[in-house]
Image: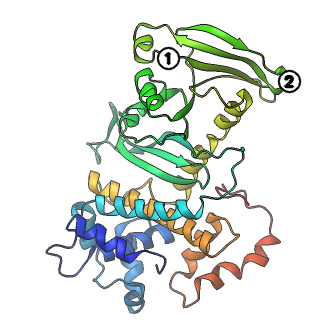
Amino acid sequence: MEFLPMYEFRKCVERYHGDRKILSFSCLDQFLSMAFAQLTFRESLRDIEACLRSMNSKLYHMGIRGKISKSTLADANENRDWHIYADFAQTLIHQARKLYLKDPFVLDLENTVYALDATTIDLCLSLFPWARFQRTKGAVKLHTLLDLRGPIPTFIEITDGKTADADVLDTLVFEAGAFYIMDRGYLDSARLYVMHQAHANFVTRIKCNTQYRRLYSRPVKKSTGLRCDQTILFTGVDSATNYPEQLRLIRFVDTEKNNRFAFLTNNFEIDAITVAQLYKERWKIELFFKWIKQHLRIKAFFGTSPNAVKTQVWIAISIYVLVAIIKKRLGLTPSLYTILQILSVTIFEKTPIFQALTETEATNNNMCDDNQLKLFTL
């Protein structure tokens, strides 16, 4: 917890008056209790209460001043503004991006490369009636913009399951010169044109029913898997009006798996094979979603209100980014998964964190691969 920027946390609390009329259980107590739940894989509020009360003599030294109780924590998650923890997570993200700014990227590009996608978290509709997805099913969507040099999430939006993926493009502020890698669910001509006018680059996949006209074809090396590199114009009634400028269509065949791809981009400067390689890097955001669902508590929630759900998700993201910051600042070689596992069993030990996270390094080097998802490769 010493790696937390407490001054910034207090600013977030004051911004939304989080501790107004609070006598005992502060926003910091709430954050630390929920952080404990994430780090030690607690399953419920009663689980958190029982475990923390068993360590009552050590809570003060952790920074928890208030009395831990199930009802108090439930009320805090229900009523404390989730924007407090969203803003604080953005502060941690800003710090993490600085630390990972100079990390090497697979491709020789100086531009920032983002992957944009959404994942669905299923919910019980009777408990979460506000999160409608299907007639008998509830869900929330986690829209995420991932910086592929970290990978660090730079933007997260939590909506109900019925929200279309492309709708999130209306809330993004596009970075000039950056690349945004998206699947075909984000193929919206009007929104893509807004991105183009902001001087941002996009790479997405074209739909089979997209109407267009070929203007020019460039030669390609078919030995690399490329099949064509064309300049096109939309000819659909709406798409031609919404996106009146030229686009680049690249067709590629993955000979290993015999898959065919058709990529659409507004960038005419990079090589055609680089466009295909950029889209291949989009798998990192799928890996990110699998990782946080597997190792953080964001599939089972401690409260049923929108505020409680968003509070838990944002605190989980804060812990993920905090562990990434610790990994970089201490120069640790273990994976994020290994660090989380070690912290879960040493969280109340009076051992320096660097010592706890490095003593097992020699042992881990001799162990077989644990077949865990790894977001950070060295």
Q: Is residue 92 above or below residue 225?
A: below
Residue depicted at x 62% and y 15%: 231
Q: Which residue is mark 2?
A: 223
Q: From this viewpoint, is residue 40 visible?
A: yes
Front position in the image: 348 or 188: 188
Q: From this viewpoint, is residue 209 visible?
A: no
Q: Is residue 177 above or below residue 345?
A: above
Left of 221 or right of it: where is 231? left
Residue depicted at x 24% and y 60%: 81
Q: Secondary structure at mark 2?
A: helix
Q: Image quadrant of residue 346?
A: bottom right
Residue 171 pos. (x, y %): 35, 40
Residue 291 pos. (x, y %): 58, 54
Q: Which residue is mark 1?
A: 245
Quadrant location of the C terminus in the rendered image: bottom right
Q: In the drawing, what numbered circle is on residue 8? A: none
Residue depicted at x 44% and y 49%: 155
Q: Which numbered disc, 1 or 2, marks the residue that appears first in the sequence?
A: 2
Q: Is residue 59 above or below residue 85?
A: below
Q: Three-letter amino acid code at disc 1? A: Glu
In this view, which residue lies farthest toward the right? 223
| Structural crowding at the residue carrying mark 2, measured as other residues with C-alpha within 10 Å and reported as few (<14), some (14–19) or many (≥20) | few
Q: Image quadrant of residue 295?
A: bottom right
Residue 30 pos. (x, y %): 32, 72
In this view, which residue lies farthest toward the left? 21
Q: Image quadrant of residue 264?
A: top right
Q: Work out how far the residue at label 1 is from the one at label 2, CA to CA, in angstroms.
A: 31 Å
Total numbered badges shown on the rendered structure: 2
